[in-house]
Amino acid sequence: MRGVARGAAPVPLSVLDLVTVGSGSTAGRALRTSVELARLAERRGYHRHWVAEHHSMPGVASSSPAVILAHLAAHTERIRLGSGGVMLPNHAPLVIAEQFGTLEALAPGRVDLGLGRAPGTDGATAAALRRTDRPGSPVAGGAGADDFPEQLAELTRFLDDDFPDGHPYARIHAVPGPVQATAPGGVQSAARPPVWLLGSSGFSARLAGTLGLPFAFAHHFAARNTVPALDLYRDSFRPSPVLDAPYALIGVAALASDDAREARRQVMTGALAMLLLTTGRPGLIPTPEEAEAYDLGPMEREFVAGRLADIVHGTPDEVRAGLDELQKRTGADELMITASAHGGGARLRSYELIADAYGLPG
């Protein structure tokens, strides 16, 4: 579970892939870029490659993490693969246990199950996902985000196949899973994917600490909360069979280019896409030319400036310095980098340049 720092990196470096779709491109091309990125990350010594569940966003093609991860598993050999994350309230815990048990069977010892409590979309889409009558309603017969601890406990029981006798689900088994090792003639491994909790506030930080689980914080869109959430996680941490000490990963938006001005042009595309999304105008990731031509109003300009301030961007040396400072300031045990850019080529090049800056292998 714990990664190993490579080259001159202060901590392990990993990849968060949003499978972004740029203006003039397609989801198919974005998914092919994800395969290229996973192979690059494996070759260059990045520790993990995670994909994140999002819905009803034209510019983000990662609505089905388990499907994407199965595809990536078929095209890689060593790198850890996982969800960053699966939004637990959107799914029945048994379904997640079955999906990730299948992934574990496909890529033994390489799968992480990162879980979030947000819907990964707007309220109306969340209602459609959960088959409710109105936005904000809990899933029929089940739970919403407020019942996340109960959902997590149920999922963990399915993953471990250890519901107590008398429980309504005691005779239900997630397959593939540990039950196959106990069946007559069974040789199935009892191993299952490690669970991570993801968050952008204190709720999951405290819960991860209390349960002794690894924690991933979304610094890339909640930078102001990073240090308080990590402090809360560490203060709340109780040793468990999973971890004897806290392990905190943070997601970081970063983009390196051979030219600092080009890096800024590229990250501007992601900042504008986020502006359009938050103001109810979701779309594909604009091109740098489209971003430059967009006429920002005063409040929009302030929003974009805030986004750019939270993205580490520039030349490889500048990005390395920014990542080093962030790791030192937060004490993060791992940095998971997401590249904000319109095209796949700029994203792939950025990961290569960051690997070079740290002297990673390959």
Image (cartoon, rainbow, N blue to C red):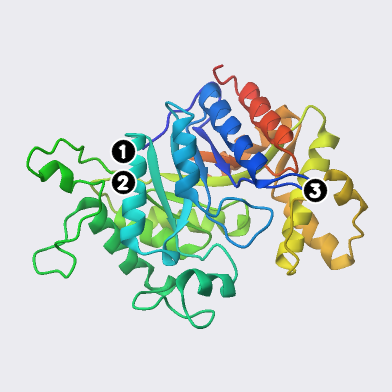
Q: Which disc, if any, is residue 101?
A: 2
Q: Position of residue 193 (x, y in %)?
A: 32, 44
Residue most extreme to the top: 362
CB under 8 Å between callouts 2 and 1? yes
Residue at 65% over, 59% down: 57
**x, y percent for residue 356:** 64, 21
Tell me how far mark 1 sits from mark 3, CA to CA: 40 Å
Task: Report the amino acid beneath label 3.
Answer: Met
Residue that numbered label 1 is attached to:
105
**Residue 5, relative to residue 323: is it above or below?**
above
Dot 1 amino acid type: Ala
In space, the residues marked 3 and 2 are separated at their CA atoms by 39 Å
Looking at the figure, which quarter contains the N terminus? top left
Among numbered discs 3 and 2, the one appearing first in the sequence:
2
Specify whether 207 is left or right of 252. Answer: left
Q: Position of residue 51 (x, y in %)?
A: 52, 46
Q: Is residue 171 found left or right of 330 in the rendered image?
A: left
In terms of sequence position, does the residue under pointer 1 or pointer 3 come before the other?
A: 1
Q: Nearer the viewer, residue 153 or 166?
A: 166
The image shows residue 154, relative to residue 74, as above or below, that is below
Q: Secondary structure at mark 1?
A: helix
Query: Which element is circle 3 on?
Result: helix
Residue positioned 57% across, 74% down in the render? 123
Residue at the outermost bottom position: 133
**Residue 237 appearing in the image:** no
User: Could you tell me which residue is drawn at 37 percent across and 46 percent down?
Assistant: 246
The x and y percentages for residue 179 are 16, 48
Quote the CA–CA distance across marks 2 and 1.
6 Å
Disc on res. 268: 3
Amino acid at circle 2: Gly
